[in-house]
Amino acid sequence: MTCQPTYHSFLHNCIFCHPKIMNFNLNSMNSTYSSSFVAGNFARKFLSGGLFFFVPAEVQMLELLLAVFVFIVIHSLRQKKRQGLPNWPFVGMLPSLILGLQGDMYEWISGVLCRQNGTFIFTGPWGTNLNCVVTSDPRNLEYLLKTKFSNFPKGEYFRNTVRDLLGDGIFSADDEIWQRQRKTASLEFHSTKFRSMTTESLLELVHSRLLPVLEESVKKSVPVDLQDILLRLTFDNVCMIAFGVDPGCLRPGLPEIPFARAFEDATEATLFRFVTPTLTWRAMRSLNIGTEKKLTDSIREVDKFAEEVIQTRKKELSLPTESEKQRSDLLTVFMRLKDEQERPFSDKFLRDICVNFILAGRDTSSVALSWFFWLLNRNPEVEQKILAEICQIVNERKDAKDKEDLDNLIFKPEEVKKMEYLQAALSEALRLHPSVPVDHKEVLEDDVFPDGTVLKKGTKVVYAIYTMGRMEGVWGKDCRDYKPERWVRDGRFMSESAYKFTAFNGGPRLCLGKDFAYYQMKFAAASILYRYTMKVEKDHPVIPKMALTMYMKHGLKVRLSRRNQTELQKHLKTN
């Protein structure tokens, strides 16, 4: 009487000793045979080996599941070479996305795009709307931003995702709504009165608030979060431009401003929706849990602030003396206009306009400046070149007192315009660390990208601006190096194509505030560099944060010290 073999001895004898099953070679996984052939061959040889009738049903099922599992793993992993990422049944590429979110999301995307020559198709879980085309090919960007602009609107998906925060403002609007807002804002942005208002408010903020706050940290010899300070500066500045009010974020003691905190929380929670299936975040919103509860609470605070400002402005404009004053803020400008039915714009419409411009103007400049100063800390030779240029411009002043009064020196608009190398250094920082690292479009009708990618109606297109600055085919072998010189020709700043350098978008949606953003950054940077040196705190982690704009996740902790006056005098005399 023979003994019944145990499960483990059975597996050992069948799989490792049976002559027919031994013919199964794992190396064939890398051969030209398909995964399905390997799995089928395994099952066929197993069944034909005369062992089928001696195997318990549980073992048969286990072996069958094992074969299916091996097939799925091999097949999914083999998709990586062709599609950029493993594509699993049911869940698509979601596991890879989740892993990417655990680290530096933008570097992860860049790695995939560079392996796929600039474009890949992301496949989300079955039944979700996470499928999209991701590209960083300049040809594709020019095609969607300019050549076929009308076929690539922001789209319903984008509007529905950001509507709670941005409403029907210029950032998310399409067609007539977008055109009307842009036309009005464009006229105002290019008016002499508006330009004067923005430069004057910036001068006041930098010299009455920014520099005193930095000086206080020097006297106390304590580090400061430069990103937080710069965010406060630009937030106060853009609120003056959009609402005509000063929230007072940048003051001694750096007070917590509910509106500013709520605005930042709302942008973070809104971004979370883009990496979450729509049904999931909508369910969370209905239940008022998680990030959706945070978003609801934050928007309530944003709406409260906007409503108070709008009602106060209406009362002010109703007074005879106030109505005669020519305010230049965007809220007042739109309040004086009528819609197509010759009716005043609704409070909701006014709120949306102002919130959108705050989003566009608050984060972009401050985030860019934060990365700029971090890069200077790593490239001190660039800082010295900037300082030499600033001193040369100051040295051209005719009045000797203006040159010697280092503490009270105020840069004039025409002097800021001459800072060519500084603009190159800022542009190079934006190339490597664009304030908006990725953006989104939707395909209106079937189309084909210049690189051959087929686009079906309704397809979401994500263009990776961050990745473009790291493509050797676009910027050369030294694409990851910080080199402002790549922007300078014969001592003059030379801009690049908007479809190669897309930090300010391109085509009809080119950023209206581009010129002011450069002026704002140059004025603030020059005012700081002329007076202070700064060092990033040792071992301070600097990584990007997942948000609509590319914040530093842990801020930028720096320690400032007064710039050596002898060094300045040396530059001044040299020039």
Image: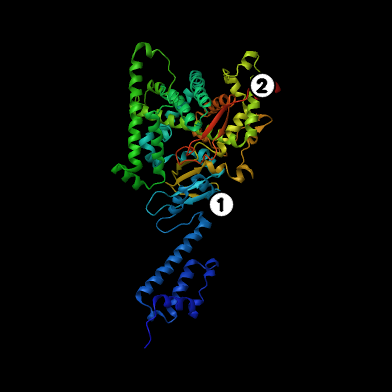
Residue 498: x and y in percent read: 56, 36
Q: Earlier in the sequence, mark 1 or mark 2?
A: 1
* Quarter of the picture holding the C terminus: top right
Number of marks in the rendered image = 2
The circle on residue 307 is none
Q: Nearer the viewer, residue 385 or 272?
A: 385
User: Label 2, on which residue?
Assistant: 569
Residue at 41% across / 38% down in the picture?
268
Q: Amino acid at mark 1?
A: Arg
Most foreground residue, 428 or 438:
428
Look at the numbered disc 2 and give the secondary structure of its residue: helix
Q: How many residues crowd around disc 2 within 10 Å: few (fewer than 14), some, or many (20 or more)?
A: some
Pointer 1 with pointer 2, Cβ within 8 A: no
Cα–Cα gap, marks 1 and 2: 50 Å
Horizontal and vertical percent for residue 410? 57, 19
Q: Amino acid at mark 2?
A: Gln
The outermost residue toward the front is: 220
Mark 1 — residue? 115
Q: Is residue 136 above or below residue 486?
A: below
Residue at figure coordinates x 46%, y 48% from the top left: 102
- Spot the residue most to the top: 321
Select label 1 or label 2 by which is in front.
2
- The location of residue 229, given as percent across then percent down, is 48, 29
Q: In the image, 314: left or right of 118?
A: left
Q: Nearer the viewer, residue 523 or 125?
A: 523
In percent of width and height, residue 71 lies at 45, 66
Residue 428 appears anywhere in the view: no
In the rendered image of this protein, does residue 9 appear above or below residue 372? below
